[in-house]
Image (cartoon, rainbow, N blue to C red):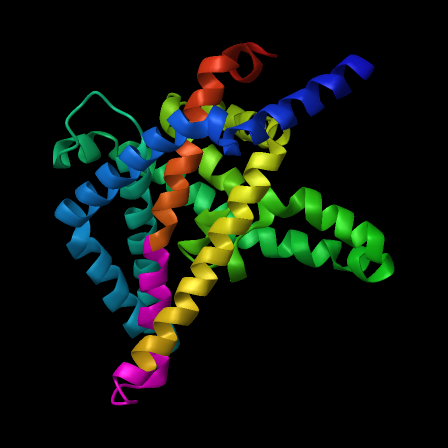
C-alpha cells in the first residue's frame, strides 16, 4: 500500500513538472502548433457550423414556442452543439490522414458514443452534485475536500453545451473513445481508464479544469460588456448575452489541445498503466 501511495504522489509531481519551463518547453511548443492548426482547420471548414449553432442557440433561448416545437428545437440544438464539439475533438486528435470532410465522415459512427457521453455528463453530474449537497452543508471541511477531489470530474458550468466539455475527465474520456474500437464493451472500459488517468495526474487536470472554466467565464463577461456598450442596446440584451456566451466558447479548444497532448504523452510513457492493466 505504501508503494502505491508513493507511486501516486510521484505521478502527481511528474504531472506538475510540465508547467516548469525547463521540462515543459517542448510540450508547450507542440501544443501551440496544435492550437494553430486546430483553429486553422475549424475556421476554414466549420465556420458555418459554428454560426448555425449560434443561430439555433438564439432561436432556442430567446424565443418562446409551444412545448412540442420547443422540445424539437431543443433536440436540434443539442445535436448541433454535440456535432461541433465532435468535429473539434476530431480535429485536435492526431491523425496521419488529411483532415478533409471524408475524414470526419469516416469517424461518423463515433458520434453516437460522443452524444451518449455528453448526455450522461449533462444529466448525471447535476444529480451527483445534488446528492452531495447534504455533505457540503453538514461539514464545511468535508465539503471542501469532496469538491477539491471532484473538481476535474465536475467542472462544467451549469452543465451547458459545450462548456460541459471543460471537464478534464470528459475531455480524456472523448480522446480514449476515439482511440478504441466501436465495440460497446471497449467503450465501457474507457470510463475506468479515464478515471485512472485523471486520478494519476490529478494536479495537472485540476489546473486545466480551473483555468479553462475561469477563462471562459472571463471571456464571456468581457464580450458581453463590450458588445452591450458597442451596440448601445440596439439589440435585445438577452440575445447579446447568448452571442457573448457562444463566442466565449471559442476559447475552449485551446484547453482541449493541452489535454490532448498530455493524454498522448501519458499513453506513450505509461501505456501499460492504461491499457494492459486488468
Indicate the position of residue 2 as horizontal and vertical percent values: 82, 16
Q: Residue at x 51, y 29 (%)?
A: 18
59 vs 165, left or right, is left
Tell which of 276 and 267 is nearer to you: 267
The extreme right residue here reads 138
Identify the image quadrant of residue 64.
bottom left
Q: Main secondary structure of the magenta part?
A: helix
User: Is residue 138 visible in the rendered structure shown here?
Assistant: yes
Q: Residue at x 63, y 22 (%)?
A: 11
Residue that lies at the very extreme toward the front in this rendered image: 22
Residue 60 position in % (x across, y down): 33, 71
User: Residue 184 versus residue 178: which sits nearer the camera?
Assistant: 178
Could you tell me which quadrant the N terminus lies in? top right
Give the residue displayed 53% in from the left and 38% down from the top: 169
Membership of 6 in magenta stretch: no
The mark tally for this picture is: 0
Query: As drawn, is 140 to the left or to the right of 270?
Result: right
In the rendered image, which quarter is residue 161 located in?
Answer: bottom left
Does any portion of residue 65 appear in the rendered image? no
The image shows residue 172, relative to residue 166, as above or below, that is above
Find residue 93 and report its horizontal and vertical position in percent: 31, 30
Q: Position of residue 25 (x, y in %)?
A: 41, 28
Q: What segment is highlighted magenta in the picture?
A: 229-250
The quarter of the picture where residue 204 lies is: top right
Q: Is residue 110 left or right of residue 187?
A: left
Amino acid at each position: 500500500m505504501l508503494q502505491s501511495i508513493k507511486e501516486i504522489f510521484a505521478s502527481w509531481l511528474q504531472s506538475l513538472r510540465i508547467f516548469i519551463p525547463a521540462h515543459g518547453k517542448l510540450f508547450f511548443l507542440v501544443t501551440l502548433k496544435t492550437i494553430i492548426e486546430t483553429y486553422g482547420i475549424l475556421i476554414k471548414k466549420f465556420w458555418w457550423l459554428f454560426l448555425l449553432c449560434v443561430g439555433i442557440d438564439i432561436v432556442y433561448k430567446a424565443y418562446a414556442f409551444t412545448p412540442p416545437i420547443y422540445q424539437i428545437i431543443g433536440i436540434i440544438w443539442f445535436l448541433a452543439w454535440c456535432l461541433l464539439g465532435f468535429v473539434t475533438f476530431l480535429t485536435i486528435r492526431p491523425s496521419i490522414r488529411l483532415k478533409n470532410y471524408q475524414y470526419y465522415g469516416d469517424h461518423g459512427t463515433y458520434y453516437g458514443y460522443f452524444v451518449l457521453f455528453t448526455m450522461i455528463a449533462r444529466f448525471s453530474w447535476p444529480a451527483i452534485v445534488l446528492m452531495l449537497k447534504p455533505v457540503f452543508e453538514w461539514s464545511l471541511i468535508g465539503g471542501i475536500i469532496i469538491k477539491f477531489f471532484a473538481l476535474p470530474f465536475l467542472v462544467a458550468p451549469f452543465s451547458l453545451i459545450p462548456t460541459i466539455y471543460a471537464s478534464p475527465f470528459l475531455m480524456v474520456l472523448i480522446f480514449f473513445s476515439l482511440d478504441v474500437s466501436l465495440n460497446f464493451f471497449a467503450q465501457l472500459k474507457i470510463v475506468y481508464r479515464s478515471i485512472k488517468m485523471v486520478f494519476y495526474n490529478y494536479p495537472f487536470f485540476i489546473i486545466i479544469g480551473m483555468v479553462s472554466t475561469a477563462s471562459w467565464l472571463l471571456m464571456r463577461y468581457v464580450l458581453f460588456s463590450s458588445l452591450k456598450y458597442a451596440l448601445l442596446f440596439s439589440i435585445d440584451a438577452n440575445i447579446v448575452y447568448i452571442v457573448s456566451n457562444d463566442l466565449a466558447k471559442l476559447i475552449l479548444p485551446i484547453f482541449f489541445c493541452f489535454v490532448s497532448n498530455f493524454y498522448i504523452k501519458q499513453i506513450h510513457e505509461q501505456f501499460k498503466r492504461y491499457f494492459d492493466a486488468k
